[in-house]
Image (cartoon, rainbow, N blue to C red):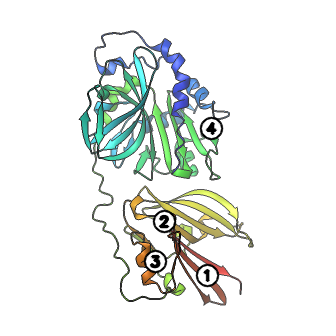
Amino acid sequence: MKHNNLTAFIFAAFAALFLTACHQEKVPLSPYEQYYHTAENIDSETICEAFGAELENVTVMSAENSEKLRAAAGDIRINNSRIALPLLVSDLPEGFRVQYGKGERLDNDYMYFDGELIFGGERLETGDGGAIIKGGEKLADLTILKGSGMSETEGVIYSMTLSSDICKWSIGEADICSPAELERIFGTPSAAETLSDENVSDLFYVSDSCEFAEFMPSSSSVMIGSLDCTRLEENNALCEYVPYNDFDNMTDLPSLTGEPKKFEALSVFKDAEVIIGDFSCAPYIPVSSLEGDISLIPLETAPMEGTENLSDKYLLLYKGRYFGLTTAMRMPDRPADEGMIYAWYLADRENLPCDASLAGIPVSQDTESLAAYFENGELKEDGSFVMYDIYELEGQSVFVFYTRNSGISALLIQSVSE
């Protein structure tokens, strides 16, 4: 999934101000106090100007909404554990580690680095005072500030980019990149601009106290940051480790085996022909019937060729994790939640936290065995697998198409004219 992280633009704008802002305290009393002054000459307008290098008309949030973003920066959940920004690397919850990446010097006293947040793994010290994290699971991209002569564990995490394809996340009350939900929680965004191939805007927020966020609905991602290092000790107390057991005890679905059979369209219209973890439903249902651990992020609405209907495309999440896409159709005068889902697209098992299936076919099952099981399926030279069937329903011909191609399993159901 595409990440659009503008942190680099922010730090490029900060560099000149940072050089004049930093005190020359050679013997800080503590690692916390080393960073107290790092944003003294930087305010919310500076952040707006930094975002303005790529955006137009960036404004500061109201005082009321700024407080909401400030509180959210202190209540970041990553796979259930809590992290607050900014934060000393050494104050991360149990099991979380930082892998430093490319660095750039700000002045004689400070450098900033790209980095990755890793859970688990083993920290192996290197001869230059750094470390390599061996193993573990990547959870986020980071921006880190580190004082000269200080260890990597004494760096400060200023911002992180989280995405539902690699972790479950929430920022305060916000646990989904739905534009309507984000505006309900944080109010009118500081800026909104379409920066991805999907016809949906990224939402930017800049508080009056140097917190900032970019929510990216097209990838269910968020970049969140804070520059107020006077809160480092306070943020340490907010962090906690919480086990991530959302997908424990979920085993892969059994593969289809036995005598070859024909794929029949009628068999698809059962209640459990779409399975995602503990969730199941029929494939042709109203959007409003998807409840519980399933979340949809609206992406694009477009006319359906040859009909009067509109097609609404959604990003599909289960328990806060990315699973694929779904598409619904409706008449133009009907609300989106009344649309009928007619297409499902699920990622391959290797990219999901648990198994899923379409038309009774697990995404964990390989295409070669599917081709051997279904008499009317076709395994093409490019490795893709396709099959379809048509049946009559109340005078209408219904076309059902299944494919496994390019890392996606897809099931489409459409009525066709006789």
Indicate the amino acid at tag 3. Glu
Q: Is mark 3 on a helix, strand or loop?
A: loop
- Please identify, in this view, whether the residue under mark 3 or under mark 4 is nearer the observer: 3
Mark 2: few/some/many CA within 10 Å (<14, 14-19, 20+):
many
Circle 1 residue: 399
Mark 4: few/some/many CA within 10 Å (<14, 14-19, 20+):
many
| Image side of residue 99 versus residue 329, left or right | left
Residue 123's place in the image compared with 147, above or below, is: below
Label 3 close to label 1 by CB (< 8 Å): no
Counting residues from the N terminus, which is met first, the one under dot 3 or under dot 1?
3
Indicate the amino acid at tag 4. Ala
Counting residues from the N terminus, which is met first, the one under dot 1 or under dot 2?
2
Label 2 close to label 4 by CB (< 8 Å): no
Q: What element carries label 2?
A: strand
Q: Residue 288, how many percent across, how many down? A: 54, 67
Mark 1: few/some/many CA within 10 Å (<14, 14-19, 20+):
some
Residue placed at 43% from the left, 43% from the top? Answer: 172
Circle 3 residue: 273
Circle 2 residue: 346
Q: Residue 335, how many percent across, how many down? A: 65, 64
Indicate the amino acid at tag 1. Phe
How far apart are the alpha carbons under marks 4 and 1?
43 Å
Residue 404's place in the image compared with 208, above or below, is: below
Counting residues from the N terminus, which is met first, the one under dot 2 or under dot 4?
4
Circle 4 residue: 191
Label 1 close to label 2 by CB (< 8 Å): no
Q: Residue 346, how many percent across, how many down? A: 48, 65
Counting residues from the N terminus, which is met first, the one under dot 4 or under dot 1?
4
